[in-house]
Amino acid sequence: MSSSRRNSQDGNTESGQRRGSTSRRPNLIEFVDSQDPNVRSAIQRHTAYHSAAQRRDARSRLLRRSSQTRYLEWGRRPSQNTEVTPATSSTSSASSVSRSPVPSGSERPQPPSRESSGQTEQESETSTSLSETISNSGTAPVVGPGISDEESILQFYRSTFCQHSSSKDVFNSAIAYILEHDAARHLLLAYSYAMRWRLQASPETVQDQVEAQSHLGRGTNILWNRLRMPGHASSDSNIEAVLLLLAYTADFGQSSEIRLHADALRTMIDQRGGLESFGHNPALQQQLWTIERSRKFHLTLGCDAPCTSPLRFPEGLRLRPPPEES
């Protein structure tokens, strides 16, 4: 009896193993001919699909990150019915300035709205002249192997700077000084990308908008941290960064923020003793002297008389104290 029971169990086990082996599909490796046009087309479609998905994900992450509000150390936005008064202590070096939100990545950078059609026509002429400069010199500057994206965009900005400007030495010295400091460097890159996006806006160049927002956020964050350092709130590098932030806001940002950044810059200069106290730094001092009469889309610089670009601050910026009455 026991022998027959064991034989029956062994038979059931063997039949179960046979059923299991027949129900499982063997692991097969199928080799395909990569030279087959159909196979190559399928591989290319598959690769392109995943590459596009990765680019979309990366772009979405940058846009979400750049749309987050960043707070500057120099205070809160005053209520609209409250007069703005300059701060006197270094810890509140620009208390007249509010938080500085980074513009949404879904919006194309736009210059502040104009109150007169004459200024709008001037801006149109400026855009046309800048576009002609690009078309005359080709498109973007030729970029050789090994040149980084930052060097490429800076080459583009240098080559498309206003053709009416004859003060190349002032321009080059300003760029050289800006590149020495992280916050100012990122804000310069943000300005350069926003400028290229303005001149060559198209679905193919939307990445310029993303890069502008990304560098603006980085520069603002670095500036925020530097302003928290005791005794360094009104340092040369911080003043340069605020100067660039003011120019970016006036040309591509929100017009409601211009006065706030201007008040911050004025307070920082006053804490240092006025514009005359920057004689040790000619590159920065020249920008501070010029910003009051600077022109739109000229970074922190002015231009020569034939330039058709409108003044950035037609009503003045008033960084210098008014002359004393005799």
Image (cartoon, grey):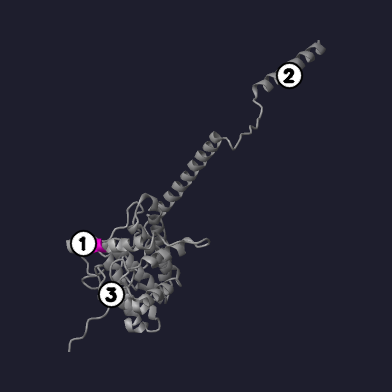
Residue occupying the point 46% across, 50% down: 58
Residue at point 77% right, 17% down? 10
- Disc 1 vs disc 2: which is toward the camera? 1
Q: Look at the image and tell me in which quarter the N terminus lies.
A: top right
Q: What range of the chain is rendered magenta?
A: 121-125
The earlier-in-sequence mark between 1 and 2 is 2
Amino acid type at image mark 1: Glu
Q: Is residue 54 above or below residue 208?
A: above
Splitting the image into 4 quarters, where does residue 156 fall? bottom left
Q: Is mark 2 on a helix, strand or loop?
A: helix
Visible residue check, residue 116: no
Is residue 307 in view from this perspective? yes
Q: For the residues marked 1 and 3, what is the alpha-carbon distance in whole angstroms?
A: 19 Å
**Residue 203, magenta (yes or no):** no
Under mark 2, the amino acid is: Thr
Mark 2, residue position:
13
Tag 3 and tag 2, C-beta contact below 8 Å: no
Q: Which residue lies furthest to the front in this view?
A: 136
Residue at label 3?
304
Q: Picture quarter containing residue 219?
A: bottom left
- What is the x, y in percent for residue 266? 30, 75
Q: Dot 3, how many residues are within 10 Å of its Cα: few (below 14), some (14-19), or many (20+)?
A: few
Q: Is the magenta stretch mostly helix, strand or loop?
A: helix
